Amino acid sequence: MFWRGVLGYLPVNIVQGLVGLATIVVFTRLLSAEAFGAYALGFAVMTLAHSALFTWNEAAMARFWVASTEAGDSPDQAATVHRAWLMFAGGLPLLALAAWAWPMSAELKSAILAGLFAAAPRSLIKIVQERRRAAGEVAGAAWLEIVQTLGGFLIGAALAWSGFGGASPLLGLGIAAAACLPIVARGELAKARGGRVEPDRLRRHASYGVPISLSLMLALALSSLDRFMLASFLDEAAVGVYHAGYSLANRTLDVLFIWLGAASGPALIAALERGGQKALGDQAREQVSIMVFLTLPAAVGVAMVATPLAQLLIGPSLAGPAAKVTPWIAASGFLGGLTTYYLHQAFVLGRRTQMLLAAMTVPAAANFLLNLVLIPRFGVEGAVWSTLASYALGGVASAALGRRVIGLPLPIGDFARTAVACAIMAVAVWRVPAWGGIGELAAKATVGMVVFALAAWVLDAAQVRSRAAHALKLLKVRTA
C-alpha cells in the first residue's frame, strides 16, 4: 500500500513542487514586500482557524475509516463526520467578524478575511481527501489535490496581477476548493446515506482528534509565531523577507514530506490494523529509511545552492536577505518534517494523541521564548536560529515520548549511510565556483545529484542496490 501511494501521489508531488516554486517567483514579483508579508500572516491565520475548527474531524475520518469499513458501519462514520463539520463551520463568521473589528492595516485585514473565506471549502475537500486516502483511493485523492493546487495558483496570480494585493493567493485557494465541491459532493454524501449521527462516535472522534488539532496549532505556532513577532518588533516588510526565504527552503522539503506522508500514514494504519506490531515494524522501518534518503539530500542541496536559487526565484528586492534565511530553514524543515510525518505517527497509531499534544508543547514554548529574546537583538537571523533550535528540541521530545506508546524503529545504520553520502555531495558542490545566476545553480545541482547518487550506490544507503534490483525484476515480469 505504501509504494502504491508513493507512485500514485508522485504527480501531486511534481505539481505541488512546481507550483510552490512558481508561487515564490510570481508573488514576490507581483506583490510588494508589505503585501507579501500580509499574505504570509493571512495564510497563518487561515491555517490556525482550520486547525482549531476542522482538523480534529479530518483526523478522525483518516484514522477510523478503515476500522468502520471493516465493521460495516461506514455510513455512520461518514454521517457523524459530516454533521460535525456543519456544527463547527459556524465559527468562521465569528472569526471573520473579530478580524473585521480588529485594528490593523487594510492590506493585512483583507488577507486575513480572504484566508477565513478559503478555510470553509478547503476543509470540506480535506475530509474527502482523508477518506479517499484511508480507503486507498489514490487516484481520486491525487487528482483532487492537483486541481486545487493548480487552480488556486492560477486564480491567485490573476487576482494579484489585477491588484487585489496580499489577499490574492488566499482568494485563489478558496475559489479553487469551492469549484471542486460540486464534483465530489454527490459521491461523498452517498457514503453517509442511511447513516446515523452517533453521539458516542462523535465523542470518540473528539477524544482522538482534539489533541491532534491542539498539537497542530502548537506546530503552527512553532512555524508561524515568528512572523507575528517580526511584524510586532520590526514591520511587515521584514515578514516578507523572512517568508520568502522560509518558503524557498521549507516548501521544497514540505512537498517531499507531504508526498511521502500521504502514502505512509494510511499504510502504517493498515499494517497495524491488519498485521499487528510485526507488520507495522517492517513497514515503518522501510518508510523512514526511504524518507530520510529522499529528504536529507534535498535539505543539504537547498542549503548549498541558497544564493543562486534565491537570485533565480525571488524578486530582486527580497532575494539577497532571503538567501541568508534559506540554509537555516532547510535544516529546520528536515527536522520538522521527520518529526511530523514519522515520529508523530506513534501517537496516531497508538491512539494516544494527548501525548502528541505534550510533545508539541516543548518546541512551541521554546520557540516563543527564543524568539522573544533573539528577534529584538538579531532581527530575522534571530527568528531562524529560534526555529532550528525549537525543531531540534521537538524531535527529541517526540522520539522520547513516542517510544512510550509504540516503538517505531529508527534504523541508525541506514541514516548514517545517507548522511555520509550527503556529506560527500556537500563537499563536491562546495568546490563548484560561485559565479552566480542560473549557470551556478545548474552546475551545482548537477554535481550534487550525480555525486550523491554515486555515493549512495557505493554505500548502499537505504538499501538502494537491493531495491533497484527488485524494481528491475518487477519491471521485467510486467514486460514479459
Image: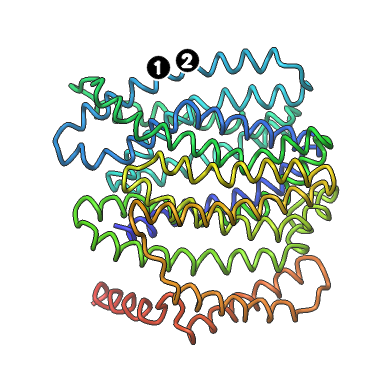
Pointers 2 and 1 in contact (CB under 8 A)? yes
| Image point (48%, 72%), residue name | 415
Q: Is residue 337 left or right of residue 476?
A: right
Residue 60, percent from left and from top:
34, 35
Secondary structure, mark 2, is: loop
Secondary structure under the numbered disc 1 in the rendered image: helix
Most foreground residue, 375 or 149: 375
Q: Position of residue 414 (x, y in %)?
A: 44, 75
**Which residue is label 1 attached to?**
87
Q: Residue at x 41, y 47 (%)?
A: 142
Q: Quadrant of the N terminus?
A: bottom left
Residue at the far left in the pictured view: 72
Is residue 455 toward the left or the right of residue 473 in the image? right
For image coordinates 42% across by 43% down, the residue present is 355
Colour scheme of the rendered structure:
rainbow
Q: Which residue is mark 2?
A: 90
Q: Where does the image place residue 171, in percent across and percent down from the top left?
A: 61, 28
Q: Residue furthest bottom?
A: 458
What is the count of numbered marks? 2
Task: Work out whether 39 lies above or below 139.
Answer: above
- Write down the quadrant of residue 82 in the picture: top left
Q: Is residue 434 above or below residue 58?
A: below
The mark found on residue 292 in the picture is none
Disc 2 packing (10 Å; few <14; some 14–19; many ≥20): few
> Marks 2/1: CA distance?
6 Å
Q: Residue at x 66, y 30 (%)?
A: 42
Q: Amino acid at mark 2?
A: Gly
Q: x, y (%) of residue 110?
A: 70, 22
Q: Is residue 300 visible?
A: yes
363 vs 265, left or right, is right
Quarter of the image where the C terminus is located: bottom left
Q: Amino acid at mark 1?
A: Met
